[in-house]
Image: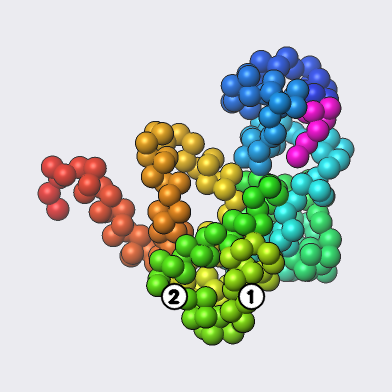
Amino acid sequence: MISTHVLKSIRVSRNLTERQMADEMKIPINQWIDMETGKRDMTPGTFNRMVNALHISDDEVPSWKHMTVGNLGSKIRVLRKKHQYSLEQLGILVDMSPAYLSEVERGEKVPSFSAMKSITEVFGVPISLFIGNKRKQSIIGDKLRIARKGRRMTQKDVAESAGISPAMVAHLENGKVQASLDTIEKISELLGISVCYLILEQEEVEDMIGAITPEMRDVLYDPKVQSIIGSICTFSKDEMVRVLNYIHLIRNPHVQK
């Protein structure tokens, strides 16, 4: 992800000791030492912590373009559509031309690190969402397979409804091909899950549930449970209120409605 030399230079340029650097990022000192010495890779979530804690410049992340995921443009497009922004409106917010953003969404250009920080601030998402990792090619496939089986659908059923071939569905689930955004949108709508759930990297899931007890974490890591959590993203306001009320009732059984 980021070389040990770059990590050390970022720390030294700010005159921070290893302990001070760990404190700034709110991580154990041993974790930082292991990353700086190459004993442990920096995960996207930890990278996000460093970005939030320090003012990282483009020059300090020379490998940025190699760190980004292949579907970076698709993710930006999903977020833009979710916020109902046109290319022109997003361009004004991030001080970029609509033509440039269009090229980014089509995968023809990769924004600089500072440009991506501006985009993530507009959408309110961590920059780690746009960073690749070793498992990224299989994540969407695994989630699609779990959602499909949870709805008792065959690959042929999904293919016919989404207007693609059964072979394509099989390749998507096996991580052999990368789905286009249009295909992901069709399948996610068919299976009743959100596009955001499909494209969310595992590190972001880990960040969100990092403070949960080990026992509960094991439950949430269950693929079937994660599929259910993903479906919640498509709930209406009334449906979400009912879910939250039910959770409140479970936690407070003595409270009468």
Q: Given the image, on which type of amino acid does mark 1 rest?
A: Met
Spatial separation of the CA atoms under disc 1 and disc 2: 15 Å
Using the rendered view, name the quadrant where residue 62 is placed.
Answer: top right
What colouring style does the render use?
rainbow
> Nearer the N terminus, badge 1 or badge 2?
2
The residue that label 2 is drawn on is: 153
Tell whether position 5 is magenta.
Answer: yes
**Above or below, comparing residue 242 to residue 158 in the picture:** above
The residue to which callout 1 is attached is 168
Query: Callout 2, which amino acid?
Result: Met
Q: Residue 229: x percent and y percent? A: 42, 56
Residue sitting at x 64%, y 75%: 168
| Residue drawn 45% across the image and 34% down it | 211
Report the magenta residues as a range.
1-7
The mark tally for this picture is 2
Q: Position of residue 210 (x, y in %)?
A: 49, 36
Indicate the position of residue 17 as horizontal and vertical percent values: 73, 14
Image quarter of the N terminus:
top right
